[in-house]
Amino acid sequence: MTLPDFDELIDRTGTTCSKWDDMQATYGVSPRDGIAMWVADMDFRPPASVQQAVERLAAHGVYGYPGANPAYIESIRWWMANRHGWQVEPEWILSAHGLVNGTSICVDTFTQPGDRVILMTPVYHAFARVVRASGREVAEFPLVIEDGQYRLDWEGWQSLLTGRERMLILCSPHNPGGRVWSTEELRQIADFCAAHDLILVSDEIHHDLVMPGSPRHTVLANAAPEAAARLITLTAATKTFNIAGAHIGNLIVADEGLRKRLQDRMMAGGISPGLFGPAMVAAAYSPEGAAWVDALADYLDGNRRIFDDGVGAIPGLGSMPLQATYLAWVDFSGTGMERAEFTRRVEQGARIAANHGGTFGTGGENFLRFNIATQRARVIEAVGRLQEAFRDLQ
């Protein structure tokens, strides 16, 4: 295959693209002179195989109800076996309209209004939004920082339990901290859920986006096979291949009882895949897609080094070591500035739209999250702007 040109600048403005077209309303940063580094999608085209799959559907020109798609199911099984060493049976795979939808289905199926759902914060902000909108209570179990990275805090968490907890949602690899959880940590999480009779939802959407030289991602189902009776694993090709607009993700469930409850709930909600998503996933989960992801990881690692070095040169700023994802988690607490001040400098001074750390829950208040999955020229420009915005500290 021809290697992708990740350096190609692609103008996404005016395409109803949330990341670029909504940043003026959200952050007061115009796409005309700003840099969008917030929404977690990439500014790259997917592998050519994905584009060709879409073009074949468009050329046919009839967009009726889709039926069974064995190629889609087999592509998921192939990918999980070859990239993650995980043997998945066809009947284990359920499809949702993306993983936020998948999370919502899990919360709705296995908890009741008033139940508590554990989130290890700071963590992906959509989890809390879904839990609260469902009438459940978010139970924030804060992570601790040791040696610059997030760690699990078992001793501190024991005192937070009330007996009303029914579910724990894990983000693995962790967003926004970029941690790849170790096999031992995953076992500890599974043991904790078993001890407190919690349904365990493992969102592994970033599992393909691991930086070269970082610890290998371990699928929780492999790390703790004994957890199968309480485990739902969420996966998707959408983050890996930048096809989030396809709105498709998987709930992979080995336990027949759990799976039947989810199937019933999904049937009640009329949830089924569309026409384009499965075809795009089947094209992505392929040898060509695998080669594309390998090239992507190398490119993102180059962006990471440039961004981390540039941010690290600003006194008081530090980017958490990024093992996985393309989301840099930058700590501004060393500046001594109030949150409003460092945020103003980033948005109004540097003209960069980045996620506010507080939206990720307790522990995120002094952070901003920067998406570095964009062309390298933009990453270099963003670093220069940040250094200029905080020049008085240097």
Image: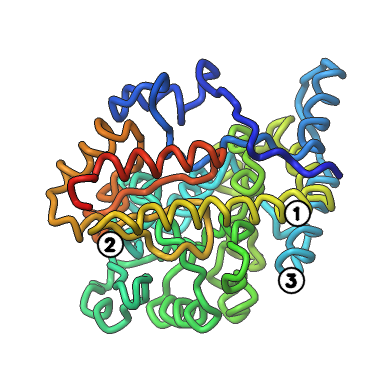
Q: CA distance from mark 1 to mark 2?
A: 33 Å
**Tag on residue 139?**
2
Q: Give coordinates of residue 220: x percent, y percent.
A: 58, 72
**Tag on residue 76?**
1
Q: Which residue is mark 3?
A: 85
Q: Residue at x 44, y 22 (%)?
A: 21
In the picture shown, does residue 94 fall above or below 243? below
Q: Secondary structure at mark 2?
A: strand
The amino acid type of the residue labelled 1 equals Ile
The mark lying in front, picked from 1 and 3, is 3
Taking 3 as reference, is 176 left or right? left
Give the mark nearest the N terminus, 1 or 3. 1
**Tag on residue 25?**
none
Q: Quadrant of residue 170?
A: bottom left
Q: Secondary structure at mark 3?
A: loop
Q: Residue at x 36, y 21 (%)?
A: 30
